[in-house]
Image (tube, rainbow, N blue to C red):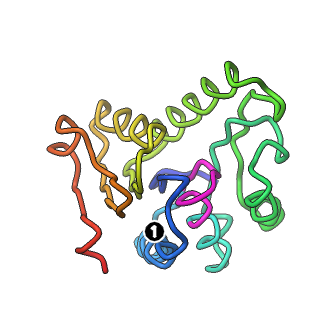
Amino acid sequence: MSFHRLVGVVGSRSLPVSFAPLVDRVVSSFLSLGYCIASGGAVGADSFALSALLRSGSPSRGVIYSAWSSVSGFSASVRPDVERFVSCGGRVIWGSASPSSPRSVAVPALLGRNRRLVSACSVIVAFLHGPSRGSLHTIRQAVSRDIPVVVFLCGGGASLPDELESKCRVIHRQEVI
């Protein structure tokens, strides 16, 4: 399957579960517009997007960009959904890091996963909660490639640096409650 209209749904690992319905609505909206969904498969916003794909019966319209070389690299809390996603027709673009990789290998693999995801997408939607260096890296990658970015600031002290705020559509927590 070709993912010519791909939206990346990414964000903070610390995103509270109370935001899962918002992520679900965003995923559902993009699916109804004919987009496919990309995610990194991490805990938080990524796993909420994965769950939304599974609930909607649309795993074949999703792709996970993985830093890991196998399912066992994913967090134990996400792994069952990744396995179900794959068994239901979802696609994973595997990375090169083994699950037991030291931090010096895992971090570059995770940043590389973010770059691959951004390169494939025509839109990025990010859900930020608290500090989130990986998500900010993804947003910077998209902005540098002139890819539209929508950022939901979901509390926990989440903010965007000034150089990014003017280049993204920012939605504050109080606007979505």
Does residue 51 sit above or below 116 in this rendering? Answer: below
User: Few, some or many C-alpha atoms within 10 Å of disc 1 (few <14, some 14-19, many ≥20)?
Assistant: few
**Quadrant (top left, top right, bottom left, bottom right) of the N terminus:** bottom right
Q: Image quarter for residue 29?
A: bottom left
* In this picture, residue 30 sits left or right of residue 103: left
Please name the residue shown 57% across and 28% down the image: 112
Q: Residue furthest toward the left?
A: 166
* In this picture, residue 38 sits left or right of residue 58: left
What's the magenta region?
38-48
Residue identifier under label 1:
34
Residue 116's spot in the image, x, y percent?
54, 34
Res 123 visible: yes
Please name the residue shown 68% across and 28% down the image: 106
Q: Residue furthest toward the top?
A: 104
Residue 94's spot in the image, x, y percent?
73, 38
Residue 88's spot in the image, x, y percent?
79, 68
Res 6 visible: no
